[in-house]
Amino acid sequence: MLIQYSTPFAILLGFVVVPLVVYALCRWLLPKRYGHRAGAIGSCAVIGLFAYGLTFGFEEFKVTHIEYASPEVPEAFNGYRIVQFSDAHVGSYAGRRQWVVQRAVDSIQAQFPDMVVFTGDLQNVNPSELEPFRSMLRSLHAPDGVFSVLGNHDYDRYQSADESTKRANCLATQQFERSIGWQLLMNEHRVIRRDSDSLVVAGMENWGDVERMPRLGDVRKTLAGIDTTAFVLMLQHDPSAWHKKILPESHAQLTLSGHTHGMQFGILGWSPMSLTKQEWGGTVYEGRRAIHVSTGLGGLVPFRLGMPGEIVVITLKHKE
């Protein structure tokens, strides 16, 4: 499938197409005596930046700290720490880059989380990519557990295979996550208790507003039996589901998502993803309800420039 050629296409774009376009624009827009030199410098700069993004840029990540404060946070969960990571795409770290995944795991554990959540896209194309990272991912732990949901790549739809093979691979992906001790939530929820208070961690299957994305998320099934007074932490890979499904069909106070990667490119914190007018990174509020969209850890294409990988630490605060 075309997705398997995304990395060669990106390399062609970054090392050939864009530099040629920059050179041509400089020759066309600038005076003749400057255009050739400016074009050559601009083309070399583009090639250098792209090379950086493919090497050091893809190996960088940051730890982002945020707070979610609300009177609806149960008092017993005041100061509760949730560590989110998303879009690991571990297949892109195979071989000499496995150390990046280990460093990310170590950084997650260094935050002393009460709970760890993963919001989808553990693999690129199929579950065969996951096995080399088994011991690293198994070592993730927290007092209340590690919870996960599937992302669009985890449904094994991006490979050239018959439907029965795809279904078998998708089941293998699910089995892998469960076998390493993660609690994979597929339109399900779990209740975490502290004294007489409780927190619901709910995990929807993927739901995307683009039709080619899996649309298996069911909000009502996910929260079946949950009282509307409960505090709900919703996990959903695709943030487009927040406005389309989660806000109108539930009372979930805080949603955690990923999927966008911040386009893996940014300039001083700005990403072209912002032009889509959707939630693409950071925290967005609707009244007291919020979604935090992680820009992810990795990517199908091993490239990041100005948009490093991200681990998010969310601290809950009870605030009247």
Image (spheres, rainbow, N blue to C red):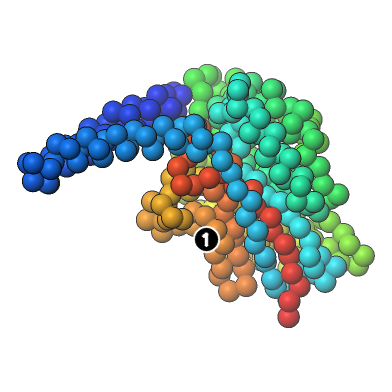
Nearer to us in this view, 276 or 84: 84
Extreme-left residue of the structure: 32
Q: Position of residue 87 (x, y in %)?
A: 58, 40
Q: Position of residue 130 (x, y in %)?
A: 66, 26
Nearer to us in this view, 62 or 246: 62
Res 245 seen here: no
Q: Position of residue 272 (x, y in %)?
A: 38, 51
Asked where in the image residue 21 lies, by quadrant, the reply is top left
Q: Position of residue 20 (x, y in %)?
A: 22, 32
Specify the amino acid type for callout 1.
Answer: His
For the residue labelled by badge 1, is the local secondary structure a helix, a strand or a loop? helix
Rendered residue at 45%/36% (across/down): 53
Extreme-bottom residue of the structure: 320
Q: Is residue 189 left or right of residue 273?
A: right
Image: 246 above or below 87? below
Rendered residue at 52%/60% (across/down): 243
For the N terminus, the image quarter is top left
What residue would you read off at disc 1? Answer: 243
